[in-house]
Amino acid sequence: MIDFETPAEIGKRLEFVRRVACEKMRPQARHYDEHEHEVPWDFINLMWDTALKTGQSFRSGAQRPDQGPSVASTALVHIIESLSWGDAGIYLCGPGAGLGGAAIEATGTKEQKERFLARYREGKPKWASMAMTEPHCGSDTAAIRTTAVRDGDHWVLNGEKIFVTSGHKSLIDSEGLSVIWATIDPSAGRAGIKPFVVEAGTPGLKVTKLEHKMGIRASDTASLVLEDCRIPLDNLLGSAEVVDRTKGFKGAMATFDATRPSVAASALGIARASIELLKDLLAQEGITIRYQAPRNLLSAIERDVVDMEAQLRAGWLLTLKAAWLMDQRRPNTVEASACKVKAGDVVTKVTQKAVELMGPLGYSRKLLLEKWMRDAKINDLFEGTGQINRLIIARRLLGYSSAQLK
Amino acid sequence: MAAFEPSEEQQMFIEAARKFASKELRQHAREADEHGDLAGTVLAGGWELGLLQASIPEQYGGFGERSAMTGVLAAEELAWGDLSAALALSAPNLVAFPVLLCGNDDQKAQILPHFCSDAYAPASAALIEPRFDFDSTALKTTATRSNGDFVLSGAKCNVPFAAEAEWMIAYAALDGKTEAFLVKKGTGGVTVKDREQNMGMKAVPLYSVDFHECRIPASQRLGGDRGTDFALLLNCSRAALAAMAVGVARGAYEYALDYAKNRQAFGEAIAQRQSIAFMLAEMFVDIEAARLMIWETAWLLDEGRDATRAACLAKNFADEMALMVTDRAVQILGGHGYIRDYPVEMWLRNARGFAVMEGIAIV
């Protein structure tokens, strides 16, 4: 039965999150934008302590593998949307298993999930990052050059990773870990690419650089260098003994199925913030939106706002559907890419339009509209560019392999 | 508890409507468009689906309850088959649903049994006015009180089945507010003029209608003294037309996808080129999004909650989406898309109508 009611158990968690977004994030947004790489510890500690107390991380929609349908992913996208409404950069600093955790959830064995994820339920704040992109390859993940070579009871990793979100926090600021995608056989292409867990403090792994970015400046985006980095054999996610040549890259794709709705939700939180502020400012000037009036009689501003709101709703419902499918434990590859495509487009255009509509006020750093426009753009880039996600959708719709539709 | 797909029962209903649309509507669509006429068999066959009877309670001769959700599910499927046929088949709703939603007991008893017979009987709604600045919430057609009656005056256009319908609802401004009046065929002061000559939706008969001091008894004011919740009717209308826009768009998308996989250029299918494949991906995404927005609107309506904003956003999004999708379908077919041997140019012409039309369908 088609039903759009928000599950009741999400409501209470959202109340807390909305208060945090309002009181702890939004007032700090400009500060952390202007003090790049400064770590928002107040926010981090609050979220970490709350997660420990409630037993519910706000960074992970972790589902117990043996249970039936849940609302974990739906809750997660709601929470992320609200936090990103507060501030997307600060949200990305949120402690917890996050992106690396999603990779472990998607590819790890039961034992590995326990071994690597238990730390996110105790002690001090910790992060888990995921390292895919390399200096020479982004969307073309099959071209990864970082290698993993077996040496007795160890894997030895060598290579360089860039654009690792929370790389510094996961490896330097906390006793966390990073999931490193590396190839065990460069001649095997996609089939040789596997996820490896490298824990903080492992010799041979260095954080070499923090990027300076257009937006989401509170979030650290790190470069990693692996030099003869030795890790235990069973840090290869999946199975340490039997290396299945068909499964490696599928794990990466399964990770994205889980994380793309989260990125979409974050994007749409920014979009909603922009639209709400825009409407407030317009209302102060006596301009309200007439939802009943015919389209051709709306003023240019009204029409822009209606379109922005419609696009936002479109993106949000696609996101909810992708999360809902995950909660139903059903495939959601197309839907995950669809919501990511839409949300990436929507937040980019909505925030740019909001700056335009407010004129010089929109362009000024006195308001957050210009910041949100800078924050927005990353959502059309990371976790799969808009183009890569279009490719994934199109291949599915057309029934084409990656060789048939390049 | 959220759920983003139809129940088993709803899915069976969709399948039945889809089968009918595929077997009966699609094949007649081009001929109907060329001749401006729907085959009588199409309407008779569509009536056998029993969509409207299933929305009317037993006490009035039907066998069910109205549901906006069922309405939008049906509207998408029928419009996928042929928009003109979808509009014609749902024309009886134009009187039946406002009476169900806003009518008083006497009006329900008087009107609803009329729509529960075995034969298709069209009905009509006179809402749109022939002006660029037509606004359904600020009509120029007026209703004034006179000796206990109402007197209607004004010009209407795009009135479906005005010449054929036994009952019509005429919308007019009463004290500055849009109200609805039940008008029986043959009422004095109503002049049905020429058939409209529009760019698309050509097979559904739309007419210009003049109201000149048309006297309507007070008992025929919809809702009696309480009047009409026009905002509700407008929201229901927007949901219906938006769902039809999705149906038209989905038809065009599927056709273009199929064509792109078969059409060869430069030694491979054109769908193997990103410029074509990405267009198809974007068409698919926006169709999916529009459908969810319409379902949300229908869900709000069935829950009895305010759907004004949702309906506005869904309608705006679906109108633009349908235009984008059908335009791209023509583009993907290239020169062939412009030729009337193929259906896509008709779908583009039909899609342009959605933003212009208000109130010619309702769920």
Image (cartoon, coloured by chain):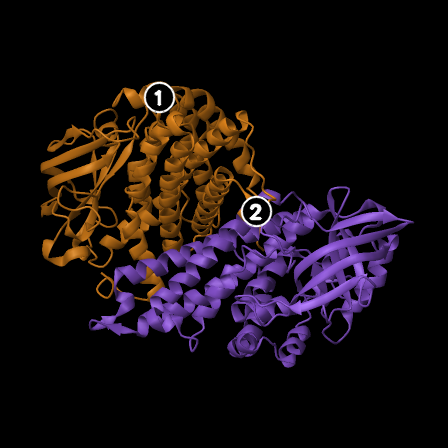
Chain colours: A orange, B purple
Which quadrant holds residue A222? Answer: top left
Residue B145 has which mark?
A: none
* Crowding near the residue tagged with mark 1, few <14, some 14–19, many ≥20 C-alpha atoms within 10 Å: some
Q: Looking at numbered disc 1 in the image, what kind of residue is underneath it?
A: Arg
Residue ranking furthest to the right: B147
Residue B11, percent across and down?
A: 56, 64
Which image quadrant: the N terminus of chain A? bottom right
The chain to which mark 2 is attached is B
Residue ranking furthest to the front: B212
Tell me, yes or no, if residue B161 can be seen here. Answer: no
Foreground tag (1 vs 2) = 2
Residue at position x 33%, y 60% in the image: A394
The chain to which mark 1 is attached is A
Secondary element type, mark 2: helix
Secondary element type, mark 1: helix
Q: CA distance from mark 1 to mark 2?
A: 34 Å
Q: A136 or A184, which is in the foreground?
A: A136
Residue B223, percent across and down?
A: 81, 50
Which quadrant holds residue A97? Answer: top left
Residue at position x 41%, y 58% in the image: B284
Q: Looking at numbered disc 2 in the image, what kind of residue is underneath it?
A: Cys
Q: Badge 2 is on which residue?
A: B312
Residue A111, percent across and down?
A: 30, 43
Tell me, yes or no, if residue B101 can be seen here. Answer: yes
Residue A106, percent across and down?
A: 32, 47
Q: B48 or B151, which is in the foreground?
A: B151
Drawn side of residue A194 relative to residue B52, left or right = left
Q: Badge 1 is on which residue?
A: A30
Residue at position x 41%, y 44% in the image: A63
Residue at position x 67%, y 67% in the image: B51
